[in-house]
Amino acid sequence: MAREIKYRSGYKYQLAEDYTVRISIKPAADIDTTFVKLSSGGTLTILGGYAWDGPSGPVIDTSRNMRASLVHDALYQLIRNRKLTRKAHKNPADRLFQKICVEDGVPRPIALAYYHGLRLGGNPAVDPKNAREVHTAP
């Protein structure tokens, strides 16, 4: 029996149950990872247990942007892991964040500001070099 554990840090939230939503991003083939699945028809399923860090930057975490941050973080993870491409999918993921924020009650001008923040500052989050490091303990 192994005595050590392997883990990743930096997460604030964990999805309590599966979440499925239809989105406009439709990959050429189905994507099936441990916690995120995206069908070629645009059905995104994020499995219970998925961990994410909520909205980034100066954005305060609220119930109005939590769903958008979940979907956006899952899509950025797919880009970072080269399941989707930065060139074709980053902007649609950023626009989807904006759209879901508006659906969930964020005023349109604020959601637009969030979008511009993602466009300007989101590139490091989709860079494969910035995948979360695996730590070992003890």
Image: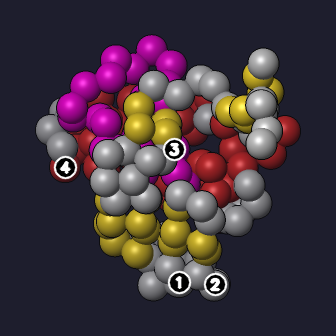
Q: Quadrant of the N terminus?
A: top right
Comparing labels 3 and 4, the label whose residue is closer to the camera: 3
Quarter holding residue 137: top right
Q: Name the residue that disc number 1 marks.
A: 40
**At label 4, which amino acid type do we have?**
Glu
Label 4: few (<14), some or many (≥20) within 10 Å? some
- Depth order, front residue of 22/20: 20
**At label 1, which amino acid type do we have?**
Ser
Task: Please state the horizontal and vertical placement of residue 128, each as a whole percent of the image.
Answer: 80, 45
In this figure, what is the number of numbered marks? 4
Mark 1 or mark 3, which has the lower sequence index?
A: 1
- Above or below for 92 versus 56: below
Segment colored magenta: 53-75
Mark 1 or mark 2, which has the lower sequence index?
A: 2
Label 3: few (<14), some or many (≥20) within 10 Å? many
Residue at the image position 39 percent from the left and 53 percent from the top: 48
- Above or below for 67 versus 25: above
Q: CA distance from mark 1 to mark 3?
A: 19 Å
Q: Name the residue that disc number 2 marks.
A: 28
Q: Secondary structure at mark 2?
A: loop
Label 2: few (<14), some or many (≥20) within 10 Å? few
Q: CA distance from mark 2 to mark 4?
A: 27 Å
Mark 3 or mark 4, which has the lower sequence index?
A: 3
Toward the right, the furthest residue is 129
Q: Name the residue that disc number 3 marks.
A: 73
Q: Quadrant of the C terminus?
A: top right
